[in-house]
Image (tube, rainbow, N blue to C red):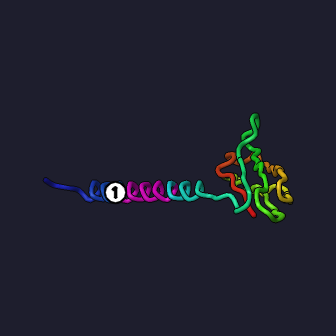
Amino acid sequence: MKLSMGSVSRTVLRGVVTAGAAGALALAVSVVTAGTAAATPPGLSCDTGKHAVDDYTGYALCSNDGGATQTFWVHLVCGWAPDVDGEHITLAPGQSGQSTAHCADIGTGIGEISVQP
């Protein structure tokens, strides 16, 4: 079988592109997996989510189940737009409160929502 330099180059290039795409996909999957492992700070019970009619607004609704005053805020990873933090909420023991934030509309929407201490 006779191979020309053009077909060898295309074969090598195709292998490099395929390996690069597979590596990028593996990195993206590991980043998403790592992003979903965000834990709620100790002493708080929190629900997080996107606004019902606005995929660019996220919230953290938390209750202070501990014995000391706690401060928290919501953190949104916003895709192509800069990440944003919501207002800092301070709760005495037994209190509940909500922090909200909004990703810029130029981005791809919320990719991750976490609660920061």
Counting labels gives: 1
Q: Is residue 103 visible?
A: no
Q: Residue furthest left?
A: 1
For the point 69% across and 52% down, the residue is 113
Does the magenta segment cover residue 27?
yes
Q: Is residue 33 left or right of residue 109?
A: left
Query: Which corner quadrant of the image does residue 32 belong to?
Result: bottom right
**The C terminus lies in quadrant:** bottom right
Identify whether 55 is placed above or below 22: above
Residue at the top extreme?
Answer: 53
Residue 4: x %, y % from top left: 23, 56
Residue at 86%, 59% in the rendered image:
92
Location of mark 1 (residue): 15
Q: Nearer the viewer, residue 115 or 111?
A: 115
Residue span colored magenta:
16-28
Is 20 on the left or on the right of 91, as rendered? left
Looking at this view, is 6 or 101 the one in front? 101
Q: Classify mark 1: helix, strand or loop.
A: helix
Tell me residue 74's x, y (percent): 76, 55
Q: Between residues 37 and 40, which one lies in front from this camera angle?
A: 40
> What residue occupies the far front of the structure in this picture?
67
Residue 85 location, quadrant: bottom right
- At a point 50% along the width and 58% down the height, the residue shown is 30
Can residue 50 be seen in this snapshot? yes
Q: Main secondary structure of the magenta part?
A: helix
Label 1 Cα neighbours within 10 Å, binned few <14 / some 14-19 / many ≥20: few
Which one is nearer the viewer's eye here, 116 or 66?
66
**Residue 100 locus on image (x, y percent):** 81, 49
Q: Amino acid at mark 1?
A: Gly
Residue at coordinates 79% horizontally, 48% vertically from top-left? 102
In the displayed structure, does residue 2 sit left or right of residue 6? left
